[in-house]
Image (cartoon, rainbow, N blue to C red):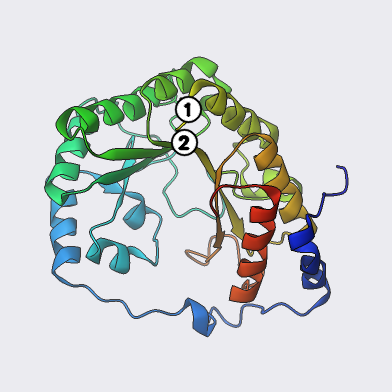
């Protein structure tokens, strides 16, 4: 791999690899990652809505620590395609196994739950469904259509798997014209095979590049990087550059937290100052929002 191009606003990132990063200590999180869990009326109402509609959320299935804050603010990310994923990423808490049958009524239930939640913007992701010919792409496309039919003013962001690289499956989703299309790269090339064993780095970039070509100009593409799994600063910068070269406009950068002792251990906790540096670097590269 060529040396990463370091933009002017990111030159100070080179010091990150020479310092002593905060290391995990017996599973204890640093102060900046600790929050008080508050289960208010909105949290309990949303939990009831999801159970009543027989829907899954990535908030619950992936063990997201922000669930209390998000649900209290009436924000949730729907998880379609069932609760079992056909791939096994060592950082992800979503269960791996043989999924249930194709639930073609799920998009309708998602749309009606979005309406009951009073959302103006809905976020929908899904498990990998390698058992299906289309990889589950119809579910994403139909969910977009159902939400838009019921709530014409509601925006939809979809976070999609790679559909095993099938262009025709991706096309189903882009033709449905979501407001945002996301596909997460998650980690750097050196760690990709270990962190994302069912995916391929170059195929991820190709999917994002194709999506940009097929989507309306005003619809941005988006990706995510998870830090704290053994990556080096220079590798992060190169991955950000690769994503920008694939015409990705929106980037999120997050901290990995180990869901259980059976999952990949945390290599380090990235400080708020480092996150600010990466944000500055990504903006210097040219991302529209970080």
Q: What residue appears at the point 18 percent right and 57 percent down from the top-left corner? A: 46
Which quadrant: the N terminus?
top right
Pick the residue in front: 10 or 99: 10
Pick out the residue farthest to the top.
168
**Picture coordinates of residue 210, whole percent (x, y):** 58, 24
Which quadrant: the C terminus?
bottom right
Rendered image quadrant of residue 82: top left
Rendered image quadrant of residue 128: top left
Left or right, 29 with reference to 35: right
Left or right, 283 with reference to 167: right
Mark 2 crowd level (few <14, some 14–19, many ≥20, 10 Å Cα) = some
Q: What residue appears at the point 71 percent right and 41 percent down from the top-left corner? A: 242
Q: What residue appears at the point 74 percent right and 54 percent down from the top-left corner? A: 237
**Picture coordinates of residue 142, whole percent (x, y):** 28, 25
Pick out the residue farthest to the right.
2
Q: Which residue is mark 1?
A: 130
Q: Which residue is mark 2?
A: 86
**Picture coordinates of residue 133, whole percent (x, y):** 44, 17
Q: What residue appears at the point 62 percent right and 61 percent down from the top-left corner? A: 279
Element carrying mark 1: loop
Mark 1 crowd level (few <14, some 14–19, many ≥20, 10 Å Cα) = some
- From the viewer's perspective, is residue 226 above or below residue 136? below
Q: How many marks?
A: 2
Q: Are marks 2 and 1 in contact (CB under 8 Å)?
A: yes
Pick the residue in front: 63 or 114: 114
Pick the residue in front: 271 or 29: 271
Left or right, 13 with reference to 215: right
Judge whether residue 206 can be spotted in this image. yes
- From the viewer's perspective, is residue 38 above or below residue 100? below
Judge whether residue 229 can be spotted in this image. no
> Which label is found at residue 57?
none
**Picture coordinates of residue 161, whole percent (x, y):** 49, 35
């Amino acid at each position: 791999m060529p040396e990463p191009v370091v933009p002017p606003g990111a030159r100070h990132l080179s010091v990150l690899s020479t310092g002593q990063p905060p290391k995990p200590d017996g599973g204890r999180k640093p102060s900046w990652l600790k929050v008080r869990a508050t289960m208010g009326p909105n949290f309990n109402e949303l939990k009831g809505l999801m159970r009543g509609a027989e829907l899954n959320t990535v908030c619950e299935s992936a063990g997201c620590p922000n669930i209390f804050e998000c649900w209290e603010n009436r924000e949730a990310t729907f998880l379609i395609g069932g609760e079992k994923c056909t791939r096994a990423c060592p950082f992800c808490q979503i269960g791996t196994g043989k999924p249930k049958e194709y639930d073609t009524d799920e998009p309708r239930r998602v749309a009606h739950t979005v309406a009951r939640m009073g959302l103006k913007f809905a976020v929908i992701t899904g498990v990998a469904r390698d058992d299906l010919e289309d990889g589950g792409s119809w579910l994403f496309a139909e969910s977009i259509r159902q939400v838009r039919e019921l709530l014409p003013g509601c925006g939809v962001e979809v976070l999609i798997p790679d559909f095993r690289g099938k262009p025709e499956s991706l096309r189903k989703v882009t033709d449905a014209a979501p407001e945002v299309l996301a596909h997460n790269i998650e980690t750097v090339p050196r760690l990709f095979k270990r962190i994302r064993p069912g995916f391929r780095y170059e195929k991820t970039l190709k999917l994002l590049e194709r999506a940009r070509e097929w989507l309306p100009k005003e619809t941005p593409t988006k990706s995510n990087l998870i830090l704290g799994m053994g990556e080096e600063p220079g590798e992060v910068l190169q991955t950000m550059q690769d994503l920008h070269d694939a015409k990705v406009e929106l980037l999120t950068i997050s901290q990995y937290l180990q869901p259980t002792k059976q999952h990949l251990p945390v290599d380090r906790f990235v400080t708020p100052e480092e996150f600010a540096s990466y944000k500055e670097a990504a903006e210097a590269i040219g991302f529209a929002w970080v």
